[in-house]
Amino acid sequence: MAIRTYNGWDSLFLQEFQKPYFVQLKKFLVEQYATHTVYPPKSLMLSAFDHTAFDDVNVVILGQDPYYNPHQAMGMSFSVPKGVPAPKSLVNIFQEIQTDLGRPSIVEGGDLTVWAKQGVLLLNTVLTVQHGMPNSHKGKGWEIFTDEVIKALNNRRRGVVFLLWGRNALAKKSLVTNPQHLVLTAPHPSPLSAYQGFFGCKHFSKANEFLAKQHREICW
C-alpha cells in the first residue's frame, strides 16, 4: 500500500505497513477489492489522514466502519460526498449540533471536509467494508492500525478531544491515558441508538470549552 499522505503520519504508516498484521490485512483487501464491491474506493481509504495533518489534530471523531451503501463512503467517518444525501446517523449529528449550540451546523450537505480542515480527524475503527454488510471487515487488522493511531495521538503534548461514539469506538477508551486529553463517550448516532444517550450528550460544546482553554475552537 503506497503512502499518499505527507501530513506527519508517514513515520507511523511506514512502521505499521511493515508489520505482519498489516501485510495480512493488505492481502485480504486486495482479494476483497478484486472480488467484491468494497467501500470506500481504494483511493479514498486513507482520506481522513489526507485531510487532517498529525500536528493539526484537535478532535478525533471515532465511528465504527464506513457507510456500506453506494456513493456514500469517502474515507472519513460519517462524511458523504457533495450531492449525496446525509445518512440518518449524520442527520442525527446535525440535530445534536442544533440542540447543543443553538444554531445549525456550518456543513453544507453531508461533506464534513470543512471539519477535517479545522483539525477534526474523522476516523473509523475499521476503514473498509463490503457492500451491504456492516462490520464485514471487522477483525481483519484495521483495529490494530487504528489503535496505533490513537496511541500516537495520546503521546502528543497538545490536548486532543476524543469523541467515541458507539461500542466499537468505546473499546478504544483505554488507549487514551494522557490526562491532558479529553475523552467523551456516547452511543452511536444511528437511529437505533441515538435516543439512548447520543441526543443530549453536548459533545460539541464540551469539545469547544476544552479547546478554548488552549485558544482553539472548532466551528461545527
Image (cartoon, rainbow, N blue to C red):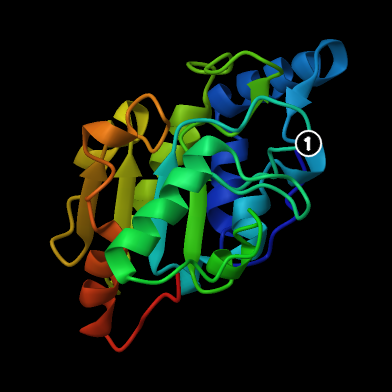
Return the x and y of residue 14 as percentages of the image width and height. 61, 48
Is disc 1 surrounded by few (<14), some (14 to 19) or many (20+) residues within 10 Å? some
Return the x and y of residue 175 as percentages of the image width and height. 25, 42
Which residue is at the front of the view, 12 or 208? Answer: 208
123 relative position to 32: left or right? left
Return the x and y of residue 171 as percentages of the image width and height. 28, 31
Which residue is at the front of the view, 172 or 89? Answer: 89
Query: Is residue 61 at least partly visible in the picture?
Result: yes
127 relative position to 83: left or right? left
At 78% from the left and 52% from the top, the residue drawn is: 83
Name of the residue lying farthest toward the bottom:
215
At 59% from the left and 38% from the top, the residue drawn is: 87
User: From what the image shows, is residue 24 above or below residue 108?
Assistant: above
Quadrant holding the N terminus: top right
141 relative position to 72: left or right? left
Quadrant location of residue 194? top left
Disc count in the image? 1
Quadrant location of residue 57? bottom left
Looking at numbered disc 1 in the image, what kind of residue is underneath it? Answer: His
Query: Is residue 161 at least partly visible in the picture?
Result: no
User: From what the image shows, is residue 157 above or below residue 65?
Assistant: below
At 13% from the left and 61% from the top, the residue drawn is: 179
Which residue is at the front of the view, 18 or 70? Answer: 70
Return the x and y of residue 150 as percentages of the image width and height. 37, 48
Quadrant holding the C terminus: bottom left
Which residue is at the front of the view, 11 or 26? Answer: 26
Name of the residue lying farthest toward the right:
34
Give the residue at mark 1. 71
